[in-house]
Image (cartoon, rainbow, N blue to C red):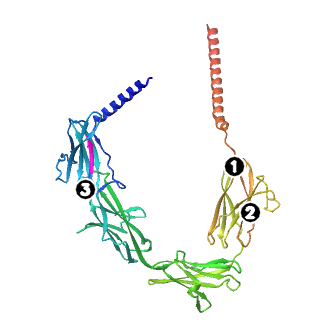
Amino acid sequence: MKLHHIILIYFCTSVIVESSKDHDVMIEPIDYGSVSYFTTGVKKSIICRGVNKNQKVEWVDPSGKVVPRQGTKRVYGQEHFVPSLKSRVPALVLTLSRTTVSDTGIWTCRSGNVHREVSICVIDPAEFVSTSTEITADRGRSITLSCQAKGDPEPRIVWYRNGDVITDQTNPTKYKIMRKFSHEGFEGLLTIVALNSQDSGVYTCGSIQENPILPECALNKNLNVTLHVNYPPFFEVENETALVPGMENKSVDLVCSANGYPAPKYRWFKDIGNMLSEYPKDDTQNDDKSVLTITATEFTFGQRYICRASNMYGTVEKTFEIYKMGPPEKPSDVIIENAAEDNLGIKITWNDLVKFPIDEINIQYKECAEGDELKGSEFDFRDAETMTINDVISDKVPQSFDSVLKDLRQEAAYCIRVRASNEVGVSPWSEVAVASTTKSESLEDHKSEPIVSIQSNTFFYGIFFGCGIGIVAVAYMFAIRLV
């Protein structure tokens, strides 16, 4: 292809593209900046380019009225011309000299029979007024949280807790939602009935601004209100004596933490019979909890220590006792929970309370016959595989622990035993448990049954057909003899 042909094609293409542009109305994109709306009281201009110089360009507001070309009006159009391929075409600049919420809607630019629309969103962003962000009330009483926002469109107030909307149906006996009008606008009220400690926390007041003319023109704002409920201290766990294990000549931390508001103050005492000897405050760490550090010795084992937590609404005490730590107890059971082709799921349990901490669990397993009676001796498990689990188990609660033995052989029986250990020592091995992995299901196994079914059906129909032919032949011979 020659150069002048390429130039001609490019020129013709350019003329066609430019010609198509000349027959359409164009509106410059609206730039709201970092938000999705114009604020009230600012000046904004939007340019619309017409079709050609012989067609007048007009702006039409959301109510259907043509925008006047008078600079004295708040909203007006100003004409000028922009260059095109053949000549200049008219353009009309829509000027909002001072934006208001009433400008929100769909605006139309038209030139002859061609028109194009653009959406404009104007909001006076809400501001929270006369709203307390921190409130304190006594337990058992009722409290009303108030939230008010001022803006245009008129904000709608919604209350949230933990991200969930609070309505009259959320908990009718606990929450009451009301709306009140004041000189600054509507006020959203949330009444919380019969306060308790669980009602303490953050409540969110949401201001929602919506425009019915343009649903996508909306703005949400939130304000957090913190509610403190005054109540006496209490411990999450009942106030029975807390037994704390300790290793001889090593430090033991007695941790005392009580719920309450205002935050409790702590004092520590040593029980010496009929008297209580108080520890200096320098010996304890006071924050949201209090820690008393004791060196475990023969003299402190069995000794009782008392933590007293108090605020202006009450006092509560908790007793601690240090006892000498030993190795973990023997696991009670090793339960096979599920078996697969190459793995076994097991649950290790202790029937009694775990008295001592567990730092590590050892699981030994080896292939064995179903009828083997392994007693769990070191000789029996001399060639066993060992899996070590280092997850720490908390003490003083009924315990169970789940694990999976992987990469096992299919259709094989395994003997399993378990023990636990800590800094002091190891527990005895558990009783030996025996379990088997399953067989892999092959494709041939699934196909075998239909094949047998087809063969047996064919055999049945073959016999039936053969018998039928025999009966017909005998009947035919009998008929011939009669003749």
Name the residue nearer the viewer: 440 or 390.
390
Main secondary-structure element of the magenta-colored stretch: strand
Q: Does 336 appear above or below 299?
A: above
User: In the current view of this chain or complex, which residue is farthest to the front?
Assistant: 4
Q: How many marks?
A: 3
Q: Which element is circle 3 on?
A: helix
- Residue type indicated by callout 1: Asp
Label 3 and label 1: CA atoms lie apart by 69 Å
Which region of the structure is painted magenta? 45-49
3 or 2: mark nearer the eye: 3
Please give the residue where the numbered disc 3 appears in the rendered image: 101
Q: Residue at x 69, y 49 (%)?
A: 342
Q: Is residue 213 visible?
A: no
Which residue does the numbered mark 1 point to in the structure image? Answer: 342
Judging depth in this view, the residue of 481 and 354 nearest the camera is 354
Q: Examine the structure image and report whether residue 307 is included in the region drawn in magenta.
A: no
Task: Name the amino acid, label 3.
Answer: Val
